[in-house]
Image (spheres, rainbow, N blue to C red):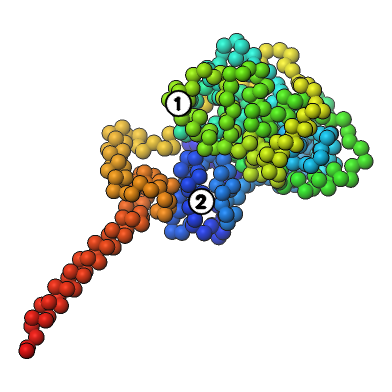
C-alpha cells in the first residue's frame, strides 16, 4: 500500500471557500465542498501552487523547526544555493555558511557541491548514450510526481539520478563518519528548503527506500535567525567549496547550462511545465536532448518557502557568481552506484476512473454526456476546477449535477414555472365557482 505524506496542508478555519486554489492546481487535487476546500491526497504533488495563490493563507506547508537538529550528536546544514540569493549585497558565500555554524550546526555541506557532481554524471551518461532522449531533469520533486500521475509515457525519460539534496546528504554523512568516528545514526543532515515538495521528498521519497536527509527546515524559518548571526560575525571561515555550475542550479536554466550542450529547454512555472510535457507526450518536441522543468516560477528561487522575490534573488545570484570558479567538484570515477535511483519511476494511476476497462469506458461515456449539459465555462462555482471534473465527480458519486449553478438555476426556473402554472390553474377553478 502506498504511503502518503503531504507537506501542503489546509487550515479550514481560514478557508473562505473561494476558487483560487482549485483553478490553479495542476492535478485537480482540490475541491470546495460545503464552503471549504478539501485536498484529494492521492492527487496532490505538493507543488505549493495553492499556497502561492490563496488570498486567505489557508494553505500552509509543514516543515521541521530548527530545534530538530538537537536530536543528533553531529549536525550538518545542507543549504540550497537558493539561500544565497535571499541576502542583499552578499559578496562572500562564506559569511552565510559561517552564520549557519553559529546557529548550532557542526558542519555545512553545500547542496551546490552535489549539483556539480550530478551535472558531470549527466554529461557522462548522455555522452555514453545510456539515457533515453530527451532526458527530463529529476531535480524538482513536484515535476517528477506530476509526470508520475499525469504523464505515464514520460516516466522513462526522467533522469534516474538522485537530487542534489539527497546526494549532498549522503556525501556529507560519509565525510562526517570518517572525520568524527561517530556512527551514522548519530549524524544528522538537514536541508534548508525553498519549497514544500522537497519536504515531502524527504518524508516519502519516490526512488529510494529512505532519505538520507533527517529534516527539512524552511528558508523562511531560518532566515531571520541566520541574518542576526551573520551581522555579528567577526570573521568568516573558508567553507565555500562550489562554483558557478552548482550555484546556478538555484534558478531556471542553471542545470541545463551545466551540460555544456545547446540542445536543451528550460521551463519554469507549473502551467508552462504542463504545456511542455503535453508537447513531449504528443512527440511534438524532437530536436532537444535535455528538458529542465521547475514547478516554481524562476526555478527554486521562486519557492513558496523563500523570503525574497524570485527575480531579485536570481539577479543577486548572477552577481554573486562573478566571484566563483566554474566548478570545484568532479567525479573521480564512473557514475557512482549510490547516485543512481534504487527503484524505477512508475506510473501512479490516481486519475484512472476504474480498474475494470468496461466500467471505465461506460463512466467516460457518462462523463461526456453529463458534461454536455453544463455551460462549459469552467467557472469553478460548483467547487470543481472545470465542468468536466464536475461531471467526473458526479459519475463517481461525489457530487450532483445541480452543484452547477446554471443547472440549478434552470431547475429552479422550471419548478417556478410548474408552480406558477398550478397556481394559475387553481385560481381559475376557484373563480369559476364563485356566485354572481
Tell me the crowding category of disc 1: few under 14, some 14 to 19, or many 20 or more residues within 10 angstroms, Cα based. Answer: some
Q: Residue furthest bottom?
A: 436
Q: Secondary structure at mark 1?
A: helix
Note whether residue 154 is visible.
Answer: yes
Estimate the x, y position of residue 143 in percent, counting from the top left: 55, 33
Kindly report the distance in space between the C-alpha atoms of the residues bearing marks 2 and 1. 28 Å
**What residue does disc 1 label?**
281
Q: For residue 251, which quarter of the picture?
A: top right
Estimate the x, y position of residue 296 in percent, counting from the top left: 60, 38
Quarter of the picture holding the C terminus: bottom left
Estimate the x, y position of residue 403 in percent, counting from the top left: 36, 55
> Which residue is rendered at x = 35% and y = 54% of the image?
404
Note whether residue 71 is visible.
Answer: no
Tag on residue 60?
none
55 shown above or below 386: below
288 shown above or below 346: above
> Which residue is rendered at x = 76% and y = 21% of the image?
327
> Which residue is rendered at x = 68% and y = 29% of the image?
249
9 shown above or below 365: below
Q: For residue 411, which quarter of the picture?
A: bottom left
Estimate the x, y position of residue 39 in percent, counting from the top left: 49, 48
**What residue does disc 2 label?**
20
> Which residue is rendered at x = 72% and y = 24% of the image?
245
* Circle nearer the N terminus (2, 1): 2
Tell me the crowding category of disc 2: few under 14, some 14 to 19, or many 20 or more residues within 10 angstroms, Cα based. Answer: some
Q: Residue furthest right?
A: 234
Q: Secondary structure at mark 2?
A: helix
Q: Residue furthest top?
A: 128
Locate residue 321 relative to residue 145 in the image: left or right. Answer: right
Between 255 and 397, the one lying in front of the other is 255
Between 45 and 294, the one lying in front of the other is 294
Amino acid at each position: 500500500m502506498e504511503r502518503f505524506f503531504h507537506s501542503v496542508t489546509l487550515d479550514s478555519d481560514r478557508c473562505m471557500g473561494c476558487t483560487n486554489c482549485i483553478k490553479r492546481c495542476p492535478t485537480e487535487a482540490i475541491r470546495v465542498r460545503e464552503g471549504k476546500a478539501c485536498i484529494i491526497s492521492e492527487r496532490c504533488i505538493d507543488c505549493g501552487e495553492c499556497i502561492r495563490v490563496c488570498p486567505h493563507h489557508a494553505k500552509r506547508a509543514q516543515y521541521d523547526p530548527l530545534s530538530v537538529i538537537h536530536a543528533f550528536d553531529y549536525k550538518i546544514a545542507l543549504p540550497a544555493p537558493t539561500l544565497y540569493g535571499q541576502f542583499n549585497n552578499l559578496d562572500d558565500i562564506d559569511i552565510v555558511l559561517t552564520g549557519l555554524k553559529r546557529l548550532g550546526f557542526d558542519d555545512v555541506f553545500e547542496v551546490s557541491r552535489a549539483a556539480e557532481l550530478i551535472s558531470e554524471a549527466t554529461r557522462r551518461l548522455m555522452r555514453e548514450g545510456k539515457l533515453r532522449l530527451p532526458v527530463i531533469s529529476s531535480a524538482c520533486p513536484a515535476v517528477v510526481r506530476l509526470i508520475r500521475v499525469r504523464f505515464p509515457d514520460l516516466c522513462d525519460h526522467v533522469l534516474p539520478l538522485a537530487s542534489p539534496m539527497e546526494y549532498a546528504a549522503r556525501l556529507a554523512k560519509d565525510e562526517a563518519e570518517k572525520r568524527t568516528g561517530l556512527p551514522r545514526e548519530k549524524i544528522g543532515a538537514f536541508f534548508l528548503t525553498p519549497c514544500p515538495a522537497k519536504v515531502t521528498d524527504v518524508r516519502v521519497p519516490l526512488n529510494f527506500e529512505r532519505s538520507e536527509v533527517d529534516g527539512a527546515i524552511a528558508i523562511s524559518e531560518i532566515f531571520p535567525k541566520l541574518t542576526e548571526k551573520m551581522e555579528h560575525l567577526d570573521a568568516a571561515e573558508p567553507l565555500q567549496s562550489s562554483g558557478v555550475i552548482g550555484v546556478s542550479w538555484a534558478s531556471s536554466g542553471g542545470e541545463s547550462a551545466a551540460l555544456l550542450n545547446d540542445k536543451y529547454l528550460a521551463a519554469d512555472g507549473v502551467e508552462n511545465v504542463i504545456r511542455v510535457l503535453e508537447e513531449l507526450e504528443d512527440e511534438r518536441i524532437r530536436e532537444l536532448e535535455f528538458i529542465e522543468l521547475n514547478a516554481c516560477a524562476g526555478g527554486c528561487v521562486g519557492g513558496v518557502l523563500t523570503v525574497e522575490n524570485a527575480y531579485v534573488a536570481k539577479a543577486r545570484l548572477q552577481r554573486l557568481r562573478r566571484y566563483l570558479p566554474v566548478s570545484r567538484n568532479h567525479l573521480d570515477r564512473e557514475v557512482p552506484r549510490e547516485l543512481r535511483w534504487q527503484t524505477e519511476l512508475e506510473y501512479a494511476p490516481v486519475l484512472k476512473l476504474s480498474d475494470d476497462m468496461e466500467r471505465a469506458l461506460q463512466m467516460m461515456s457518462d462523463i461526456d454526456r453529463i458534461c454536455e449539459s453544463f455551460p462549459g465555462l469552467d467557472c469553478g462555482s460548483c467547487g470543481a476546477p472545470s465542468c468536466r471534473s464536475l461531471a467526473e465527480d458526479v459519475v463517481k458519486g461525489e457530487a450532483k449535477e445541480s452543484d452547477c449553478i446554471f443547472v440549478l438555476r434552470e431547475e429552479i426556473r422550471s419548478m417556478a414555472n410548474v408552480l406558477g402554472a398550478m397556481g394559475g390553474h387553481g385560481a381559475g377553478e376557484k373563480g369559476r365557482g364563485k356566485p354572481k
